[in-house]
Image (cartoon, rainbow, N blue to C red):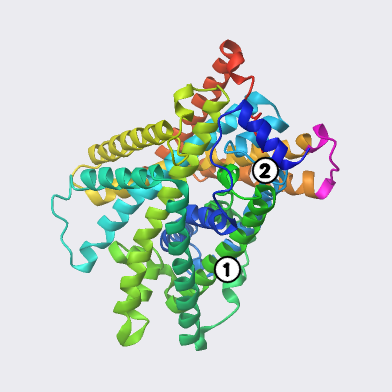
Amino acid sequence: MTEEKNISHVKEGYRHLKFNQLTLRHAVSQAIGLNAPGGTIVLYVAGTAALLTFTFSGYPDGSFSIPLILFMALIVYSMMSYSSYEFSKYLSSSGGYYTFVANGLGRSFGLTTALSYISYQILSFTGFGILGFVGFAYAILPSLGITIPYINVLWIPVSVIFILFVSVLIYKGIKPSLRYVSYAIFIEVLFFIGTSIYLILSHASSVTFTPFTAIPVGGNFIILAAMMVYAIGTFVGVGGSIPIAEETKNPKRNVPLSIILSILVLGVTIILASYSEVISWGFSNMVNFGTGSGIGAYPVLSIYKNDFGAFSSIPFIILLIIVINSFFTATVSLGTNATRVLFSLSREHVIPERLSRTNTRGVPVYAVIFITVLALAIVLSTGLAFEYIYPGRPIDALLYASVFLLILESPITYIVHILTNTSLYFFLKKNNQKTHIVRHIIIPGISSITLIAAIVAAVYFDLSAPYIYGVYGSLLWVIAIFAIVIIMYTKYRKNLDNLGDFSL
């Protein structure tokens, strides 16, 4: 049966999103946009460095190995993405990961994946996209001499406007929103690659291969491995094109290809930027890398403000604009994917039918409304809760609220990938496809073991408050997901009959 006949059959049986709207360019942009390289370079590099310095204080210059740590994380994330790459050659659905798992391990595991993926998307939407942006603005504006009026409450209308603006853009259709994202991402990547090369050349006397060795941490590979576990999140987003496969031309070619291209683009951009940062900062100054306050907490901002000579103000202002836009594009991509998965669950009769109703642009309107309301509730309740815990410290409260949600979603994200890795072999066997012990068992197995180690590490390092709140919250969230799955499987099993059935 040809793909065209498959599509005709699908049209008769299920609601569907508009086919063939998007190209490979859109698919790659969705994945890279979800990663938000600008925000990642500013926040994750500094965060990883600060955590390394705090946790392993005996190696004050250890952050000089950040490029190696990120390279190791990229290798692991590439292995994590391999199962998705293989699956996307066979299955194309807005259900994304849960469609993969349901067809490999069964419907109960598919539902676990669906709930975990939606949780991850909405927690990233709120924790990184909204509170991350507000916390970043609150942290750096005073350092730039800008006074924030009504500092205790201004974040509330700003967050509401941000969420509503993103929701309107998603409502207007995936093609216009991804057209904007693709142009923005092209400029963002080009800017960081170009400026990183300039910084390296301008510090030519400091260029060394040491950042790609274990020398800064005294040759201790355990430290590198531990920090790599935390740095895995740097490359989140590589699979961002999977839930839009249904709307992409020739998805069984373009979605797998977008995964490969996203890994290459993000790997080059982020690792090159991190190398230029540590070279510009200098080995002897690494103890202060990412450990300051205000603008000092973000080394890349200090570098771009001072290391471009008389014209430093220009790249610095461009950097700020790009980082702010990076939060925006990430939020659009995260919201888009969350609505697609809700749409898929609805059309397969797992959740109310209303959530799969689309407008004339092919957008699942009620899914967009649901995500908007949920995002508002999470942002406002979390922000206000941390302001209550840390009275009179609005900057700290918002930064902690953002980190709390990001820590909360991390183990949930890992569950999605662990189940996808485990499903691949069983899916291929069920469908009488050839299997390979290295590609379909060993690579997914190593990836899953690393992710389990990441979950264990989060508890083992006994993070202090407020970070430990996210770990505890994540455990409760996972328990809630399992409880919902058990209830659905035992009392509403009929609702799961069609879960994972739709694919082009």
Determine the secondary structure under disc 2: helix
Amino acid residing under circle 1: Val
* Circle 2 residue: 448
In the rendered structure, does residue 436 fall within the stretch colored magenta?
yes
Lateral position of residue 393 relative to residue 175, left or right: left
* Circle 1 residue: 268
- The correct choice, above or below, for 385 with respect to 219 in the image is above
Q: Could you tell me which quadrant the N terminus lies in?
A: top right
- The correct choice, above or below, for 55 with respect to 445 in the image is below
Q: Quadrant of residue 191?
A: bottom left
Number of the front mark, 1 or 2: 1
Numbered range of the magenta stretch: 428-438
**Residue drawn at 44 percent across, 24 percent down:** 354
Residue at far bottom of view: 205
In the rendered structure, does residue 160 fall within the stretch colored magenta?
no
Q: Quadrant of residue 281?
A: bottom left
Q: Is residue 192 visible?
A: yes
Question: Is the residue marked by circle 2 packed among few (<14), some (14-19), or many (20+) residues within 10 Å?
Answer: many
Amino acid residing under circle 2: Ser
Observer-nearest of 28 and 52: 28
Measured as percent of width and height from the top left, residue 195 is found at 45, 77
Observer-nearest of 362 and 38: 362
Q: Is residue 215 visible?
A: no
